[in-house]
Amino acid sequence: MVSQPPQGVPAPQDGYPVRFDVDVTDVPRDRVTVGLRIFAAIPILIVLGLVSGGSFSSTTSSGTQTMGAAGGLLFLAPLLMIVFRQKYPKWWFDWNLALMRFTNRVGAYILLLRDDYPSTDEEQAVHLDIDYPDVPHDLNRWLPLVKWFLAIPHYFVLIGLGIASFFVVVIAWFSILFTGEYPAGMREFIVGVMRWENRVVGYALVLVTDEYPPFRLKP
C-alpha cells in the first residue's frame, strides 16, 4: 500500500521513499512577523513540545506537582512489531507521519521559509510524504535493530549542516528585513537540509524503509 503524494512532492519513482518539499511563497514577506519570529513561535513550540513528549511542572503550597504529556515518535513499539510479528500497525505509522509533518511545519516557520503560522492539522505549504511499508516484502525484520547505528555517518553530517543552517538563516533573516526576499540559494539549502533530516529519521527512527538515505540535499 502506497500513500499518494500531495501536490509539490515528487512521486515515489522519482526518488527516496521519504519525500519532502516546501512551496515557494509568491507573496511579499511579512517583515514584522519575520523580525519577531522567535517570539511569535513560542506558543506553537510549546504545543509541539507537549505532543512530542514534553513535560512541565508547577509548584503549589502543598508541594511540587509535575504534569507531563505522552507523545513523541513511536520507535521501540514498531521495532518490536517488525522483528517479532513482521507488522507495522497503520495507526502507528499515521501517528509518526502526522507528528513529523507538524514538526516540519513548525521548523519551516522558524527557519523563515514561510510566514503562515503552523497549523496543528492542515498540510499548508510544507509537504512530507512517506510510503507505508508492506513489511514482509519491503523490510528486513532484523535490520531495525541496527539502523540507528548504520545511520551514524548521517548524524555527523547533519550536525555540520545544522551549524551551517544557523548562519544561513541569520543571513536570510537580515535579507528579508532589508529586501523582503529569502535568497533562492539559501532557501534551497535549508529545504535540502530538512529533506536530508527527514530521510534519516524515516530510515533510522520511524523504520519505514530499508533503503539507506542518500548523501544529498536534492530530491
Image (cartoon, rainbow, N blue to C red):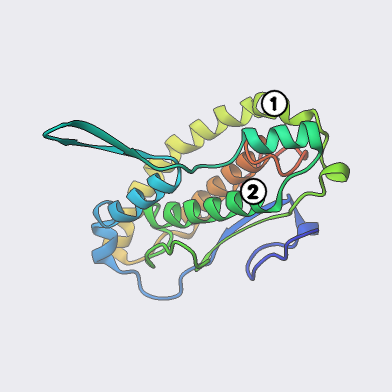
Q: Within the image, what quadrant is residue 87 found in?
A: top right
Residue 80 or 65: which is nearer the viewer? 65
Cα–Cα span, label 1 and label 2: 23 Å
Q: Residue furthest front?
A: 62
Residue type at numbered disc 2: Trp
The N terminus lies in quadrant: bottom right
Residue 180 or 195: which is nearer the viewer? 195
- Of the numbered discs 1 and 2, the one sitting upstream in the chain is 2
Q: Which residue lies furthest to the bottom in this view?
A: 27
Q: Mark 2 points at which residue?
A: 92
Q: Within the image, what quadrant is residue 29 found in?
A: bottom left
Q: Do the residues labelled 1 and 2 touch (CB within 8 Å)?
A: no
Residue at 38% in and 48% down: 169
Residue at 49% in and 31% down: 159
Q: Nearer the viewer, mark 1 or mark 2?
A: 2
Mark 2: few/some/many CA within 10 Å (<14, 14-19, 20+): some
Residue at 72% in and 66% down: 4
Q: Mark 1 points at which residue?
A: 150
Residue 157 or 203: which is nearer the viewer? 203
Residue 70 coordinates in the image, percent (x, y) = 45, 42
| Disc 1, SS | helix
Residue type at numbered disc 1: Leu
Residue 128 coordinates in the image, percent (x, y) = 60, 57
